[in-house]
Image (cartoon, helix red, strand yellow):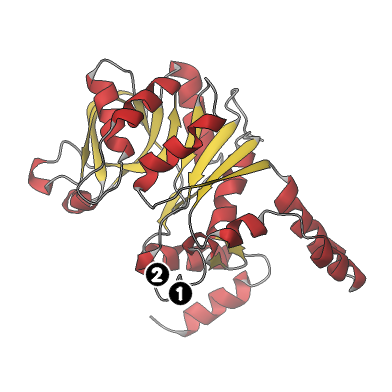
Amino acid sequence: MFYVNNIQKVIIPVGGFGTRFLPATKAQPKEMLPIVDKPVIQYLVEEAVASGIKEVIIVTGRAKRAIEDHFDYAAELEAFLESRGKADLAKAIRRISSMAFFAFVRQKEPKGIGDAILQACPLLGDEPVAVMSGDDIIDAKPPALSQLMRVFSKYRAPVVALKRIDKKDVYKYGVIKGKKIAARTWRINGLVEKPDPAHAPSDLMIIVKYILTPPIFNYLAQTKPAPNGEIYITDAVDKYVKNGGKLYGYEVKGEYYDCGDKSGFMRAVVSFGLKHPEIGPEFRKYLKSLHI
């Protein structure tokens, strides 16, 4: 474990329709698409657990029941595997449901991550909480969430994960403006959603991986939906900062994969496939044979 403070809960919003992966996501959640032999959502939960999280709040939507089933106890499957002499696999299946306490909250409409956090607020109490996107995987040791927790432990203020990107691509993301105060660490004084590259305040992309504190929830509750109907967490956090709230950003170490994007998802499949103890060597040999 890389547990460094008393943050016990994480919110993982997964209520979107996953339209970029249609027709594959017509009848299954995007977050259940497998990277080799584990769904995307499991990688995120494992990162949270490795960072010391005890309670996982997953904000779901319509047609997302498969996510709840995945983290549920599967007695029949475990018994079947054990009867076939596959005790190790049965143990791995059992671990999925026992690695944390799971709570599931239904988001009535896919109104963005900000709204998803608001739906989870009744389960939070007056305590800091981690938030992780259902799309963003960062392969890192220590885990990316644990890296943010270390920054939170030092400054006792909200923290967001950052990644430096090509300036021409900033129009696709939210970016920060701020001042560097330590290695990989920024004091943020503003957030800008999808800026024009010519006027972007930085090339530091906001990854939806936060440590948030209760005051931000108040701003989130007052945030009006964007024209597309979504409530953006960046709007609430930006207002919090402009009213004097402290916010820090940390350029997390590790390999980042945007699994909400087809290209990013396939990069993750290849990278994790090459590292997989069962298929890695054979898969590497196959890729070399393509002479790409």
In this rendering, would 265 be left or right of 54?
left
Looking at the picture, tell me which residue is in the foreground, 112 or 188: 112
> From the viewer's perspective, is residue 87 above or below residue 121?
below
In this rendering, would 54 be left or right of 264?
right
Mark 2, secondary structure of its residue: helix
Whether tag 1 and tag 2 are in contact, CB under 8 A, the answer is yes
Is residue 172 in view? yes
In this rendering, would 149 be left or right of 173?
right
Q: Which residue is farthest left?
A: 198
| Crowd class of label 1 (few under 14; some 14 to 19; many from 20; radius 10 Å) | few
Alpha-carbon span between mark 1 and mark 2: 6 Å
| Labelled disc at residue 180 | none
Per the image, the residue denoted by label 2 is 21
The amino acid pointed to by label 1 is: Ala
Question: How many marks on residues?
Answer: 2
Q: Position of residue 255 (x, y in %)?
A: 44, 51
Q: Position of residue 83 (x, y in %)?
A: 91, 71
Residue at x 45% of width, y 70% of height: 25
Is residue 188 in view? no
Residue at x 49% of width, y 68% of height: 270
Q: Quadrant of the C terminus?
A: bottom left
> From the viewer's perspective, is residue 261 above or below residue 53?
below
Looking at the picture, tell me which residue is in the foreground, 169 or 236: 236
Residue at x 76% of width, y 58% of height: 92
Looking at the picture, tell me which residue is in the foreground, 60 or 162: 60
Snapshot quadrant of residue 125: top right
Residue at x 54% of width, y 37% of height: 10
Snapshot quadrant of residue 114: top left
Q: Position of residue 271 (x, y in %)?
A: 50, 63
| Labelled disc at residue 24 | 1
